[in-house]
Image: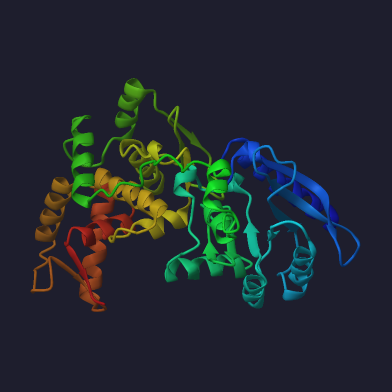
Amino acid sequence: MSTYAKGDKFEEQVFDFLSQEIAHDRFYFRSDCCQIFRKKGYFSSARESDIIFDIAIEVSMPGSDKPSMLVLIECKNYSGTVSVDNIEEFGSKISQVSGFNAKGIFATTSAFQAGTLNFARNKGFALLRYFDQSEFRWELPRALLTGASGASSRKRAEIEYALTQPDFRPTVYSAYAVTPAGFADGWEGIWKGLGLENTLDESELKLIRQPALAATPRVTFISKEKIERLAEQTLKSISYSRGTVDLAKLVEKENIVIGLAVIFHDDSPSVLGSITFYPTEIKIFATESQSPVARFTLAHELGHHFLSHGRYMTRESVRAQDIDQSQQITIPKSEVERLEWQANTFASCLLMPYEEFHTAFGLLVQHLEIRNRGYGPLYLDNQRENVAQFHRVCTALSKYFGTSKTAVRLRMRALGLLVEAT
């Protein structure tokens, strides 16, 4: 595809997205006060001719023919990083538009060179790195994606990384930006950061401002203990007694109760599994349906189901690195990371039930004559004997519960049965 064709396609993608935002009243101002255009010109007294912009959003007061505000957007799809030289002309073009309160956004799919961020902020326009959402791991409601221009230092660092690193690939937000007011990773934060309402008085804002979003539930905090109890209740519903949990029996029960469908496919190079809600369907990508990875993936997706995560997401997919990374003992602060932590904690509790795991661990340690020397029931450091004991315990429990050794290790740590030297 030629450079021109790539740029035109990207421009169309951004235009279609913003058109939908306006049409469905998700834009900052009411849809009946906004019009969106492609390739429209605005007069420059310095040039004595029109300057054409890729995308323009005109915001007008009710009954007025003249826009009170313009949002002017330049769309570029570069093969390399974006330099100050690439954006300098855009800043000049914005400043030449006379007779309007003009706000500018330079949008691209590429990463920005570090010096561009301060340049754009000082010139009063925004830099936007835009991503296609079609391959995202999560599809979430807008209320979880609003972002903020007054971001914390940690969040600012994340957004700056997203803006400047060519290999960055998002999983949640489609838009990362630096604005005159700061950093933002959601469209609401971008519009606020541009100061769209700063030049209007309160009476004017009341006429065109979008009503505040109806509050939707944030991701509820759920303790490990509560997730443990939910897993125990789920196991009781299929009369679990000991050994490897029969997930097929659980799936069959949920199919009768709510019509849950679980479909197995061949291995996928990109995902291990996925879940979609309304109706609920789980897909597992594995050649061997009873492998430890396939079982944990299914338990993870069942976790989203039993934890009622359909309140927060429309669909989700999970990759191998996500399973490895999100089996943490500490609870993440991010909304979406918390959903994954909850699902993985449920999977661990479901596949390695609390009482049965303690019983099996205790009998195994007794059988292997592993003594607690004051460091914990099982201690792991670099000593050969401790390493050998650890591997024997992990291997035996992995076979007994049909899980990976990594899952067993993390479960033992979470329950305080394994102490690892720092």
Q: Is residue 108 above or below residue 271?
A: below
Q: Is residue 392 above or below residue 266?
A: below
In this rendering, would 371 be left or right of 79? left
In this rendering, would 135 be left or right of 19? left
Which residue occupies the foreground of this view, 354 or 371? 354
Q: How many marks?
A: 0
In the rendered image, the residue lying farthest to the right is 48
Q: Is residue 222 visible?
A: yes
Q: Is residue 126 above or below residue 248?
A: below
Residue drawn at (60%, 58%) of the image? 199
The image position of residue 158, as x and y in percent, is: 49, 67
Residue 198 placement: quadrant? bottom right
The image position of residue 245, as x and y in percent, is: 26, 39
In this rendering, would 256 be left or right of 122? left
Locate the C terminus by quadrant. Answer: bottom left
Which residue occupies the foreground of this view, 180 or 272? 180
Q: Is residue 403 visible?
A: no
In the rendered image, the residue lying farthest to the top is 256
**What coloring was used for the rendering?**
rainbow
Residue drawn at (53%, 44%) of the image? 206
The image position of residue 182, as x and y in percent, is: 53, 67
Residue drawn at (63%, 60%) of the image? 129
Residue 250 placement: quadrant? top left
The image position of residue 329, as x and y in percent, is: 28, 60
